[in-house]
Each structure stands twice: as C-alpha cells, then as structure tokens.
C-alpha cells in the first residue's frame, strides 16, 4: 500500500505545502485560528513539526536536536501531546508569517529530497514509541497542513479545501500504517476493557480495512472476520471529526459519516481509545460544507 501511494503522497505534500505557505504569508498573524492559537502560532506549530521530521527522516536517523523535545517524544500519549506542542512552541520562537512560510517550503523540500530514494514502507520511531512507515510520516505532515490550513482559513475568513483524495492519505498511510507496525503507548489512556470491538472502515478513496480494539490495543483485523460496526466515511470529514473540528452529529447529518452494523452502539467505546488530539477547538461552531475540494 505504501509503495503504491508513495508518489501520490509526495506530490500532495509538495502541493499542500505551497497552498499552506501562501495562506500563511497572506494572513493576519494576530488573527485567531483556534481559541488558543493565532495564525502565527498555528503556522509555527506546523513548521516545528516539519523541523522535527527533517531529523526523524534523515538517512542516519539522527535524534531531535532539542534535548527537552527528544526526552518527551518517546513517552508522549494522545492525552499529553498538547504539552509537547506547547513546549515546541516555546522553544520555536519565530512568528513572522513570511519567514515561517519560507522556512516551511525549505524544510519540506529537504524532506522530499532526503526521502527520494528511501523505502516508503520502512518504519521509523514516532510519538509514544510507536513506529510509522516513512510514507505515513509524510501523510501525517499532509494532514497537519490540511487541518491547520482549515483552522487558519476559518480564522481569517478565506476558502480552504480539503480534497477527500488528499485527506485519505492520513487514514490509509498513517493510521493504518502505524497499526500494522507498532502503536506503542501513543493511545494509552483510560483502563482498557476486555471487550473486543471490530470496526470496518469503508470509503471510495481508501482500501477497505477493519480495525480491532481488544484489551486496549488496536490492530488491523483479518479480512473476512466478523465486524461489529461499519463506518462509511468521507476522508476529509473523518479527519475533521477525529481532530475535534467537526462534531459526530454534524458529520452524520450531512451523510459524510454513516454508521451501521450489528452493534453500532460500540463505536463510542472504540473512539474513546482510537482518538486524536483536538487542540481545544469548539465543536459547536464547526461546519462541514467547506471541506470538499
């Protein structure tokens, strides 16, 4: 899967970086993109991630230069990643939009250059001692650009599209890629239940896959095994839901997130473990009619 999507994710990363950089350079840096972050803060957050990836993806596998970040990364969970983000923003002080846009373009160009001849299926260490294929790391950066571009665009009142084909890379290469390798402790949280929950994910833009939650651990299920929940989704909306930008109810009302199966009531329990950070964005103010590209 990673090999087939490798040229796609590389092209998308290049294109979305250009869109995001143009958006940042032309926006009021002091406008609020989220309740907590300005446009400049949001852009700095994305640049800080790109900076970490220039080290993470280096051929020699060098360690992150900042010792405070290097110490936190292996132990972070989805519930403590906000603390890591705050630390990174304190350490990374640049806030000029034009400078941030130029830095992002340069860093992504370096990432694409250093990974040009690499094996996209090779797994590298990620947050919480998880392991993610290199193609998945690029897909994660694509998603950061798409989600935070959405934040900035809403904050300054300008259009921003999240094409489903581009959004699908995050689910297929990053989420599924991590689960096929090693989730580590990144999803650790509340005490696990013994209940087994299998959720089949289906979209026109992704390969059908079943994700299984059992005793607090997640894995990719065997083809043809029974499932409890079937989730049919638009990848752009699913990502916005997972990151708290769009409510489950709003996504369901638009028909872009449909739940069925023999035990659909088990989905909330599944999502309490298979969850992603929300960056404190209020769900009640979100819409889904501006995400299609």
Image (cartoon, grey):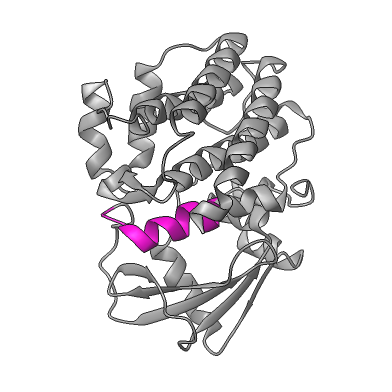
In the image, 67 versus 245, the foreground residue is 67
Answer with the quarter of the image where residue 188 lies. Answer: bottom left
Residue 222 horizontal/vertical position (percent): 42, 80
Query: Range of the magenta residues?
Result: 170-185
Residue sitting at x 33%, y 26%: 87
Relative to 31, residue 214 above or below: below
Q: Is residue 279 visible?
A: no
Residue 152 position by quadrant: top right
Look at the magenta stretch and give its main secondary structure. Answer: helix
Report x, y in % for residue 269: 43, 72
Q: Is residue 120 left or right of residue 13?
A: left
Seen as rendered, the residue at the extreme front is: 117
Residue 59 location, x and y as percent? 33, 31
Task: Check residue 12 for magenta coloring.
Answer: no
Residue at 42% in and 24% down: 51
Q: In the figure, is residue 151 to the left or right of 135?
A: right
Q: Position of 132 compared to 144: left or right?
A: left
Kindly identify the residue that appears in the image at 75 percent across and 41 percent down: 161
* Residue at 37% over, 33% down: 57
The location of residue 160, given as percent across then percent down, is: 75, 36
Question: Does 242 sit left or right of 195 as displayed?
Answer: right
């Amino acid at each position: 899967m990673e090999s087939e999507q490798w040229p796609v994710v590389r092209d998308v990363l290049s294109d979305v970086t250009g869109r995001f950089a143009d958006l940042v350079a032309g926006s009021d840096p002091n406008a609020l993109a989220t309740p907590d972050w300005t446009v400049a803060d949001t852009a700095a957050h994305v640049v800080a991630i790109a900076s970490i990836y220039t080290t993470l993806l280096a051929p020699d596998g060098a360690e992150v230069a900042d010792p405070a970040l290097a110490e936190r990364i292996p132990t972070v969970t989805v519930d403590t990643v906000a603390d890591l983000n705050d630390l990174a923003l304190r350490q990374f002080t640049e806030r000029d939009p034009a400078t941030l846009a130029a830095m992002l373009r340069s860093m992504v160009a370096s990432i694409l250059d250093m990974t040009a001849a690499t094996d996209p299926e090779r797994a590298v260490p990620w947050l919480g001692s998880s392991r993610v294929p290199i193609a998945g790391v690029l897909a994660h950066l694509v998603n950061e650009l798409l989600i935070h571009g959405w934040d900035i665009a809403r904050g300054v009142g300008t259009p921003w599209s999240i094409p489903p084909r581009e959004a699908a890379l995050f689910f297929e290469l990053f989420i599924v890629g991590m689960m096929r390798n090693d989730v580590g402790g990144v999803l650790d949280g509340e005490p696990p239940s013994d209940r087994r929950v299998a959720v089949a994910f289906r979209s026109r833009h992704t390969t059908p896959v079943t994700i299984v939650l059992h005793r607090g651990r997640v894995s990719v299920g065997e083809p043809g095994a029974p499932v409890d929940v079937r989730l049919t989704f638009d990848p752009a909306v699913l990502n916005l839901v997972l990151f708290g930008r769009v409510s489950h109810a709003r996504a369901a009302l638009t028909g872009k997130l449909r739940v069925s199966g023999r035990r659909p009531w088990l989905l909330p329990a599944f999502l309490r473990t298979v969850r992603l950070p929300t960056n404190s964005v209020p769900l009640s103010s979100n819409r889904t009619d501006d995400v299609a590209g």
